[in-house]
Image (tube, rainbow, N blue to C red):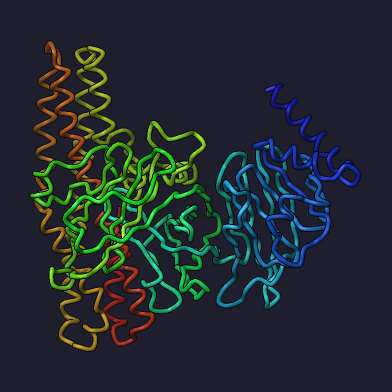
Amino acid sequence: MRLYQSTVLVLAVLGVCVGAASASDGQEGLNSILNESPYTYLLDTGAPSPGALSERELARKTGWTIVPEDNLRHKFRGDTVFLNDKITVVLRRSGSGAEVYSQTADGLKQRAQLFACADGADRTAGLSSVRIIENNPAAVMLELVFQTQQHKNVSATYRLTTGQIYLEIAPGDGMNRLFIRSNARHTVVPDYFGDDVVFSPGSFKGSRIGVPAENFLLHMLEGNDGIVMCVWESDEAAAQLISSSESQGRVISGCDIQCIKGERIWVAFMEGSNIWHEQLISDQDRDRDIILDWEPPFRCQWRADFIKNDELAQSCNFRDKPEPESVWAAADEQACFCWFDRDRPCVRMPKLRTMEMSESNTAGRAWPVIVYPIDRSRATPLRVFCPTDIMRNTLGVGPCEYILEKEGFGSEPHSTPDQVTRWVENLFKKKKEKQASAQIEERLEQMLEHIRLAQTRISQYGDFARRARKLTDKAKSNKAVADALGRLLEMVDQMEQNIVIKSNSAKLPESAARLTDEIIALVGKDGAQADCLKLGSQIRAVGAAQDKALSKCRMAVRRIKQQCLMIAAREPQAGDFAGKVRELAEQMLQEK
């Protein structure tokens, strides 16, 4: 503790000295401190800039001074800058938002502009005031007030911490939306246990499109060297993507996130050459193994999205070896279509699961596949951040906890099949299962209750699909309404069919109960560890199947809800039917 306090004191003194010496000694001392330190700093540029700062100005920092640590009353003479070793945020007096630069292999590069927005088209026109709330090596936090074109005030709090690649935004008075401007080639809504949703510029019929994201999405940046991840705390916040025409063609120019006061938003910047990859696979190559023209920049859990006609991709994570041919022949939907062959990334085009596709309408097509990092592995370098890291650091949960929280299982600690079976296996490994037999039975029963509740929730999704189907069937009697509903009818049909196809999952609780009895029967037997591991693996497979079913069902309802909102906005004649289905979807998503 004393060492940390001494370090902070030295840094504070250095900050004052740099401020005093900058006029005579140039900026070498300032850059030396900033370049060699991972800490956060608050700086004053000395003079306001009429336009966005160039990479050269950011590198030179001419006339800039460090605001001394714990100085919360500083009056800025120029523009406000705060940074760590990964992110630099510039707040210009004449600017209407925050300009965010991320550290790349080639230096700082502007990755996004963040705008605190009021209602409607009333945009921010300039920065009115900056109040320093926190200013130390661990974090810098500022309260910002922007003035809109209609002379209203919009406030927000921005916070940056040491070593992190994300900026935290807390909406204040008058702030209803956060617009994140960042040109993207694709935007991905990850679904850890199901299929992702992938939006491209061709997804848009207008300039805006709603996304079925509950808490996060990924912008795949042009150039394949960066990913911007947006995360929001509120389950109620809606997000829209914005499309615009640029010199290189139509692009996704950013996203608009609804703000709920008291609920934070984070924007993270993941950098690296070839950090994501896109490649077209021709229809002629669908039945053979393809080595991607791409070299992963680091080891981690990579994920591939095979993009279909609609936004719903077919997704799977890369494995260390290909599936057996027997799995391919069975066309099992659990089959993995991506693997590494001595570090070479290989894929095989899956049989795309969609009503729209038949052999006749796929001839001559080229199918995009995109690859991106989703989670770390044991070999992932410590300096690398993956989306799951950001998810854990901001929302405080991992993928499994996330879906369980959404479905109302968050109040049941340590009762998932994965948690319980691994705890039991550890007892067998240490030969302590006999002493803990009563605890084992209790924990296994808690796990079975968890499985039963999960199955009940899956059944509720089946009920939703049937109710939504009855509503849409009525709409089919009116051709004009049916035409307007279009894609919504297909989504409801697909969801109902998928749940009917998966109806055998109702046997999962029975299967888990039988496996649990077999584990209990092993207690006290010699050499039982191997059998326990085998049974535990089968129970974990039950849990994984339920997690995937829950996640896919939830994504389907989110997409149906979003489609209803789009229909209501542009197809008035179908608004009544779409509104009724949307109400069902909202009720389903809110139930726990």
Asked whether residue 204 is in view, the answer is yes
79 relative to 446, above or below: below
Which quarter shows the N terminus?
Answer: top right
Q: For this view, does 453 lie left or right of residue 82?
A: left
Q: For this view, does 290 lie left or right of residue 218?
A: left
Q: Quadrant of residue 49?
A: bottom right
Residue 379 locus on image (x, y percent): 40, 32
Residue at the image point whose x is 52% and y is 37% from the top: 383
166 relative to 145, above or below: above
Residues 427 and 327: in front is 327
Residues 118 and 271: in front is 271
160 relative to 363, above or below: above
Q: Quadrant of residue 75?
A: bottom right
Residue at the image point whose x is 27% and y is 63% from the top: 367
Residue 392 locus on image (x, y percent): 44, 42
Residue 402 locus on image (x, y percent): 36, 46
Residue at the image point whose x is 69% and y is 63% from the top: 52
Residues 440 and 28: in front is 28
Residue 362 locus on image (x, y percent): 19, 69
Residue at the image point whose x is 44% and y is 58% from the top: 220
